[in-house]
Structure formats: structure tokens, C-alpha cells
Amino acid sequence: MKHFDYLIVGQGLAGTVLAFKLIQQGKSVFIIDKHREHTSSKIAPGAYNPMVLKRFTPCWKVEEQLDPLKQFIDDFETSFQDKIHIPMPLWRKFQSVQEQNLWMEKSESARLKPFMEPRFISNPHQHIQADFGFGQVNNSGRVILPKMIQLFRDRMIKESLFLDEEFNQEDLELKDIVRYKDISADKIVFCEGHRMTLNPMFAHLPMLPTKGELITVRINDLKVEQHIKTGISLLPLGDDLYKVGATFNWLEKDEIPTEAAKVDLVNKLRALVDLDVELVNHQAGLRPAVKDRRALVGQHPEHSQVYVFNGLGSRGLLISPYLANQLIAYMEESIALNPEVDINRFAKEYTC
């Protein structure tokens, strides 16, 4: 039987970041993940920025998240000798003079100065409708998540550290160590995304999967190189391709693209852009959202070998390296987790 320090279930964004960082620290890791073409991590735009753009406020603990994200990106690109990161300014479209004034007011605050350019950008794009111009958000960019996940997956498969199958709870044994078929480990971490709702060990955690749909379009001659945010997100991919999204649907719990969402996104895009739009792709996924909008990180209330790293939500890229560092410090050195993400906040919901 092969023995490892960690068995990780799920290799989306959360599982990839956590496994990479554990290996960096000299830990042995084995991953179990069923290959799927369409998951929230693989279809996500991979864009990050430090602000909540509806209200011009900083993201939760953003100052503590940016450095771990940059360090992870640098370490990953160095390890694989490949590029996954594209620095890209984000432009928030203004809808009114009132929004311009609010931007100027907020950009003067000490906390937001590093993130907000204290000026207006007149619209330089003849085919974009933006009468009131834009505000630029700094410390933003994009990571090509499908490439990142595939690079890591390929390496783990090559090193015989990967099992491509659906995890079967009936094959899991929890004694002094963790056993799964012919694999054993000191600890197991579940990074299953929205599929955690099917995991009986964490049924008490209030995950609320949220369906999101995106379209990829070709817009010849638009020549936009910035990530533009308004009622929709317009993210340039190169070669006249753009990813546009995303919708939020709290009712449907499937990953099937819908005509209604496609029409909604195309209509919003045509209100922003006055060029012909060619639909190239239409995708849907389920985000691992949580009732209180905080991640789910920590140790199972009954089984000390069992952990969870999940619920990263729509800002998963920005937050994942920061929280992975916290979880590793907790598992290895018993350093307490931030109580806002520790699953102990739901301890009263757990029944044996």
C-alpha cells in the first residue's frame, strides 16, 4: 500500500493550489479527481481584482491576499517554466456623474489609494458605449485557469500521483490513518467544489451552489485590451476573442447552458458594443458559494484526519493561496484559522 502525507479529493482551483503548496513544503500528495470538461474552475474567466466594484470597496482582507497570490503565480510559472498569468488593467465603466464623483471620493481614502487611479479615463474605444468614461483598478489581472489545472494534472499523472475516478465514500476508511483502496495517508482534504453537497461528511455545511453562465464571442476590430466591467464583464482573450459574463442563478443546480442566459448576455453586450458579435462558445458551471459568503476551511468535527478546503466563491483565485497558507499552517503547526472561514462556525449544525 502506498502511503502519503496528504490525500486530496478534487483538483479544481482549490485542490490545485493546495496540492502545489503542500508539495512546495516537502509533503507527499496524492490526488483523486474525475476528469470533467466543464467545471466552474475550468470555465471561469480567471480574472482577479482587489475591489467590490458595485460599491467601490475593498475585498475582504485583500491586503493579506495579494502577496500570496503573486507568490503562488511566480512559483507556479517557475516550476513549470510556462506562463499562466496575464497582468491586465481593469476598467470600471461609469454610468453617471454621481459614480464619477463617488470614485474620486473613494480613491482618496488611504486604504483604496493603492487600487484606484484617482482620475477619469475618457473612452478611447470608438465601438464601446461609455459616455462617462472609466475608472482604472490596479493590481488586477488574469490567470489562465484551464492551463494551470492541466499543467499540474499532467505532472501528477506522469509521477503516478493521480487517480482519475469518482471518489467513492464507501471505499474510505478512517482509523489511525486514512485508507482509500490501495492508498493510505495521514490526512485527507476534500476540495470538491459544489459536489461537496453530495459528501455526507460535510452535509451540515451550508453550501449554496450558484449557476453561472458565460459566452465566448468574436468581435472583429474591437481592439480592447482592458478588462471592462459594467453590468457584464468583457474580458479580452486575444485574437478578437472575448469572454463575457457572468450570470447568477440561485435556483437551477445544473451545468446546462440556457437560451435565456445567452440572450441576456448577448443583449447586454450589444448595449455596450456597436459591432457585430459572433457567438463562439456558451458554458455553464456551478460556483461553490456559501450562505454567509465566506469560505469553508478546517477540520471535520469528529474525524481529526479529515479536512475541507472549499466554498471559495467567485473570488476564488484571489483568495485561494492566502487560505491555502492558513490551512497548511493549521494542519502542520496547529495555528488557528481565521474564525470567519473556519467551519467551526457551523459546529452547532453537525449531528453525528
Image: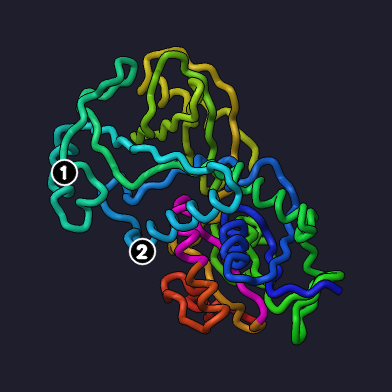
| Quadrant housing the N terminus | bottom right
Real-space Cα separation, disc 2 to disc 1, in angstroms: 25 Å
Disc 2: CA contacts within 10 A as few (<14), some (14-19) or many (>=20): few
Q: Which residues are magenta?
A: 305-324
Q: 299 or 326: nearer the eye? A: 326
Q: Tag on residue 102?
A: 1
- Numbered disc 2: secondary structure: helix
- Numbered disc 1: secondary structure: helix
Residue 36 in the image: x percent, y percent?
71, 45
Disc 1: CA contacts within 10 A as few (<14), some (14-19) or many (>=20): few
Residue appearing at x 70%, y 52% in the figure: 155
For residue 141, above or below residue 189: above
The quadrant where residue 64 appears? bottom left
Residue 257 in the image: x percent, y percent?
61, 34
The kind of residue tagged 1 is Leu
Q: Which residue is mark 2?
A: 64
Residue appearing at x 60%, y 69% in the figure: 308
Label 2 vs 1, first from the N-terminus: 2
Asked if one can make out residue 352 in the rendered structure from this viewpoint, the answer is no
